[in-house]
Amino acid sequence: MTIGTSLPRADGPAKLTGRALYVDDLRPEGCLYGATVRSDRAHARVLGLEQDPAFDWSDVTLVTAADIPGRNLVTLITEDQPALADGLVRHVSEPIALVAAPTRDKALAAAKHVRVRYEDLPFDLDPEHAEGGPPIYGKDNVFKRIRIDKGAAKGTVDGIVHEGTYRVGLQEQLYIEPQGMIASVRPDGGVTVIGSMQCPYYVHKALKALVGHDRVNAVQAATGGGFGGKEEYPSMVAAHATLLALKTGRPVKLIYRRDEDLRATTKRHPAIIRIRSVVGPDGTLREWNADVLMDGGAYNTLTPVVLSRGVLHVTGPYRCPNVHIHGVAVATHTPPNGAFRGFGAPQAMFAAERHMDRIARELGIDPIALRRLNLLQDGDTTASGGKVHDVGEIG
C-alpha cells in the first residue's frame, strides 16, 4: 500500500551527498569542447563563411551544414528546422556553424573569429502582422489554427458585453543547469550522447535522421531542472555535439554559457488574447468569445500542442452555454518558442482570470462571488464538449 506513504527518491542520496554527476562533471578521455557560431541577423541569406587569418586554427575543427551525413533537420512535429542554417537564417542566434577545440575558452574564441557574410532580407517580429508578412512558414505563416464553437451562433446572445485584451510576453524557464551534451562516436560507428534532457526519445529520433542510421543511444544525465526547456531543445544541442564528434573522431562536450542559453533556447510563447463576454445582470456567463494569438517564432517546435492547450483553457474553470474560440499560432523572425510547464494554459488562464476581474469590477460584483457563481459543476460541459464529473464541493 503506497497511497499516503512518502516514497524515497531513487536519485535523492546521490544529489544530497554531491555524488550525482551532471553533464559538465563528466570528463571523457580526449574530450574536445564545442561552441556555436550564431546569426546576428533576423533574416538574411548566408553568402559565405571566413575564418579570421589572424586566429590560430591549427587545433580547431569547423563544421557546417555540408558536414551533415544524414538530413539537415531537427525532427519533431514537423521537419522545418535545420540543425545548421544552410544558406538562410530566419532569426537572431540561429546556429550557422560549429567549432571544436581542446579547451572551452579556445572554442568560444574560435566561434567569435568565424566571420559570416550576409545579404539582409525583410523581417517581421510582430505576430499581429505575421499572416501578411514576409514568408517564413507555408503560404500564410500560420503554424496551426484551431476553432471551437459551442451553443448559439456568435453574437446572437443578449446581455451585458465586456471586452478586454490581455498580453503575455516571453518567459524563460531559467533552469539551474544550462543546456549541455557530450557526444562520442563508438567503435561500431554508432553515436552515444549523454546530457541534460527531459525526453531522451526525442533526442534519439532527431539524431537518427541527422546521422542517417539508427545506431544511436541517448542517455539522460542528472538534470539540473528543465520545466519544458529541456524537452525539445536538447535535440539541437545533441545534434551539434554529434556533428563535431563525427568530424573529429573524439568525444565533444558542448555546454552553453548562461547568456547563450538565454538568447538562443525556446521560451514560453508570447500571446495576445482578446475576450468578449456576454453576461446577465447578476454576472452569469451567457457567451464567451476568445481570440488567442501565439507567437511561435521562426520554426514550429511544439507550437501546435501549446496552442491547443491554450485554446482549451481560455474559458478557465467556468461554465458557459455559448462559446466561440479562435486560436492561431504564427511564425515570426524570432527564436523559436516551445515547451514550458503548463503548455499554453498559463497564458490562457491569465487572460481568463483577468477578464473575470474586469467583469466583476464593471458590474460592481465581488470577484470571488462572481467566480463561485460561474464555476463548473457536475454535469456541465466544457467548451470542447467534455462532460464534467466529481468537481468537488464549491465552498
Image (cartoon, rainbow, N blue to C red):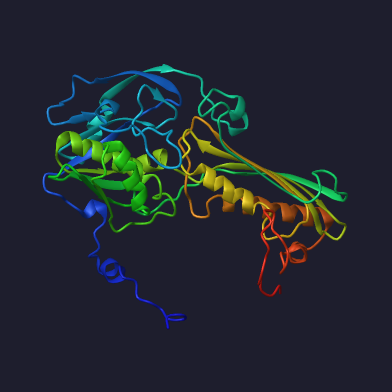
User: Of all residues shown, which one is farthest toward the bottom?
Assistant: 1
Q: Percent from the top left, x then y, of residue 257?
A: 31, 43
Count of numbered badges drawn on the protein = 0
Q: Is residue 304 above or below residue 382?
A: above
Is 23 positioned to the left or the right of 166 in the image? left
Quadrant location of residue 183? top left
Q: Quadrant of residue 235?
A: top left
Residue 358: % across, % down = 75, 52
Is residue 105 shown to the viewer in this render?
A: no
Looking at the image, which is closer to me, 380 or 50? Answer: 380
Image coordinates for residue 98, horizontal then vertical, percent: 26, 32
Image point (29%, 47%), residue name: 180
In the foreground, 7 or 67:
67
Q: Is residue 67 left or right of residue 370?
A: left
At horizontal 33% and vertical 52% (from top left) the residue drawn is: 200
Out of 188 and 275, give the one closest to the viewer. 188
Quarter holding the N terminus is bottom left
Quarter of the C terminus within the rendering: bottom right
